[in-house]
Image (cartoon, rainbow, N blue to C red):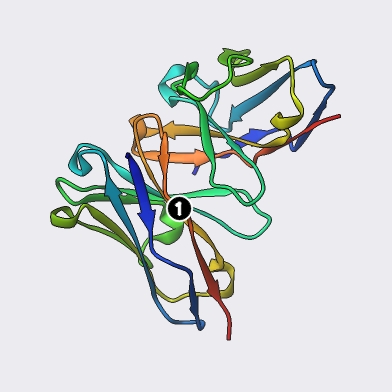
């Protein structure tokens, strides 16, 4: 099974910009991995922010964006807010969507 | 209202089985795959597999092969995840989620395995 890697933790200042990345042990992440990004706050179910690399859900704040960057999937937060402090999980498809793997998650601190 | 409603918390002894249900409402149940994800206390998310309710087709992570069975009852728009041979490291919150955007998740079901 593939291993999906994320930064364990990142810190951003309020109003600042930060990029979270998501790599795959099988090689470059492409649109064919249908990259997802989930946000999870303590005691809550995960919430989808980005699907299929860069598509936003209706509830996704405009300050979040998804892309492919240097062979990885990336989630960029521009203008961080205190309420963005959370765990963020990358999620990739393999075998055309038959199998899926979560990254280990990035704990984002806004301070 | 589009939602997935899961069954309540369970406490099981090692070696027992647990069956978690996930009832869909507000959308066409047979038009989506239903995935199951779990999260052990203080740990990350772990994808377990999916079921395609209209055909009953399934795919499981190899780690759970032989211990997990995902089924569905289209007459009541409900998916089930059955996990056997429970161990203490199966203690987790189990979630169901709808594919295609993964915008709909169940509220989670806490399964505690303890002697």
Q: Camera-side residue: A66 or B24?
A: B24
Residue at (41%, 21%) from the top-left corner?
A32
Residue at (39%, 76%) from the top-left corner?
B17
Q: Position of residue A36 (x, y in %)?
A: 50, 28
Residue extending farthest to the bottom is: B115
Q: Camera-side residue: A79 or A1?
A: A79
Q: Is residue A25 left or right of residue B66?
A: right
Q: Camera-side residue: B71 or A44?
A: A44
User: Which quarter of the picture shows residue B30?
Assistant: top left
Residue at (62%, 52%) from the top-left corner?
A43
Q: Position of residue A71 (x, y in %)?
A: 59, 17
Q: Camera-side residue: A5 or B24?
A: B24
In the image, residue B86 sits, relative to residue B107, either above or below, namely below
Crowding around mark 1 (Cα neighbors within 10 Å: few <14, some 14 to 19, many 20+) is: many
What is the tally of numbered marks visible in this picture? 1
Q: Position of residue B92 (x, y in %)?
A: 55, 62
Tell me the residue that label 1 is attached to. Answer: B95
């Amino acid at each position: 099974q593939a291993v999906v890697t994320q930064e364990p933790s990142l810190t951003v200042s309020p109003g600042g910009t930060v990029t979270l990345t998501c790599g795959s042990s099988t090689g470059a992440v492409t649109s064919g991995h249908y990259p997802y990004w989930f946000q999870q706050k303590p005691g809550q179910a995960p919430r989808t922010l980005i699907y299929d690399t860069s598509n936003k859900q209706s509830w996704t704040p405009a300050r979040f964006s998804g892309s492919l960057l240097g062979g990885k999937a990336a989630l960029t937060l521009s203008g961080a807010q205190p309420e963005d402090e959370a765990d963020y999980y990358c999620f990739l498809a393999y075998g055309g969507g038959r199998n899926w793997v979560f990254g280990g998650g990035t704990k984002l601190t806004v301070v | 209202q589009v939602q997935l409603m899961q069954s309540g918390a369970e406490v099981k002894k090692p070696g027992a089985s647990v069956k978690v249900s996930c009832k869909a409402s507000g959308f066409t149940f047979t038009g989506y795959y239903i995935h199951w994800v779990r999260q052990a206390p203080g740990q990350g998310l772990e994808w377990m597999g999916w079921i395609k309710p209209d055909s009953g087709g399934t795919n499981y992570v190899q780690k759970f092969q032989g211990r997990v069975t995902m089924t569905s009852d289209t007459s009541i728009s409900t998916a089930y995840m059955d996990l056997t041979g429970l161990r203490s490291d199966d203690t987790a919150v189990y979630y169901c989620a709808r594919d295609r955007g993964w915008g709909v998740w169940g509220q989670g079901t806490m399964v505690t395995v303890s002697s």
